[in-house]
């Protein structure tokens, strides 16, 4: 189990992590999960903030991310320098139906806030993060 703020070498996160959704309002609504690196390319000068590393929609309440719709496939951490944060944001989708999302055209300078507003996701209902640095 990943502990918040844990340091993982890139090799340990090269494939998508097994993410379980253990929150729920009882509404039966599905969830959207995104993973971002807000420290790219370097924590001191994050000019590419944020890089999208993973985007999964339609995750069933109480389910696994692997049961959702992978919109942007997992890209494991590969920080060029320094120690980077990798942040997981979880959103409860409005309604019970599936969310239809186009794959982002670029992953750099990805705005979670703009994405959430575009798809009426509101604020994240859960968040966690890990650290990774070049080996």
Image (spheres, grey):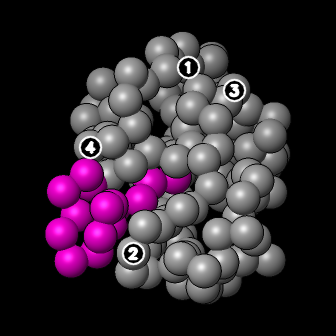
Q: Main secondary structure of the magenta part?
A: loop
Cα distance between the residues tagged 2 and 3? 32 Å
* SS under mark 1: loop
x and y, in percent, of residue 66 in the image: 80, 40
The relative height of residue 79 versus residue 72 in the rendered view (above or below) is below
* Quadrant assignment, res 10: bottom right
Number of residues whose C-alpha sits closer than 10 Å to that of mark 1, classed few (under 14), some (14–19) or many (20 or more): some
Cα distance between the residues tagged 1 and 4? 23 Å
User: Foreground: 19 or 12?
Assistant: 12
Give the number of the disc on residue 99: 1
The residues colored magenta run 35-49
| Marks 4 and 3, the one that precedes in the sequence | 3
Number of residues whose C-alpha sits closer than 10 Å to that of mark 2, classed few (under 14), some (14–19) or many (20 or more): some
Q: Is residue 45 magenta?
A: yes
**Residue named by callout 4:** 109
**Residue named by callout 3:** 69
x and y, in percent, of residue 36 in the image: 44, 54
Q: Is residue 114 left or right of residue 80?
A: left
Q: Is residue 60 left or right of residue 104?
A: right
The relative height of residue 129 versus residue 14 in the rendered view (above or below) is below
Cα distance between the residues tagged 2 and 1? 36 Å
x and y, in percent, of residue 105 in the image: 39, 21
| Marks 2 and 3, the one that precedes in the sequence | 3
Circle 2 or circle 3, nearest the eye:
2
């Amino acid at each position: 189990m990943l502990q918040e703020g844990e340091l993982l070498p890139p090799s340990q996160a090269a494939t998508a992590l097994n993410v379980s959704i253990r929150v729920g309002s009882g509404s039966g609504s599905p969830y959207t999960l995104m993973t971002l690196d807000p420290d790219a390319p370097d924590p001191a000068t994050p000019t590419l903030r944020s890089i999208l590393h993973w985007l999964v929609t339609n995750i069933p309440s109480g389910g696994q991310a692997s049961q959702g719709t992978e919109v942007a496939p997992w890209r494991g951490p590969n920080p060029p320098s320094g120690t980077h944060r990798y942040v997981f944001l979880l959103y409860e989708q409005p309604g019970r139906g599936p969310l239809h999302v186009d794959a982002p055209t670029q992953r750099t300078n990805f705005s979670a806030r703009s994405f959430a507003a575009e798809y009426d996701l509101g604020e994240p209902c859960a968040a966690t993060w890990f650290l990774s640095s070049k080996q």
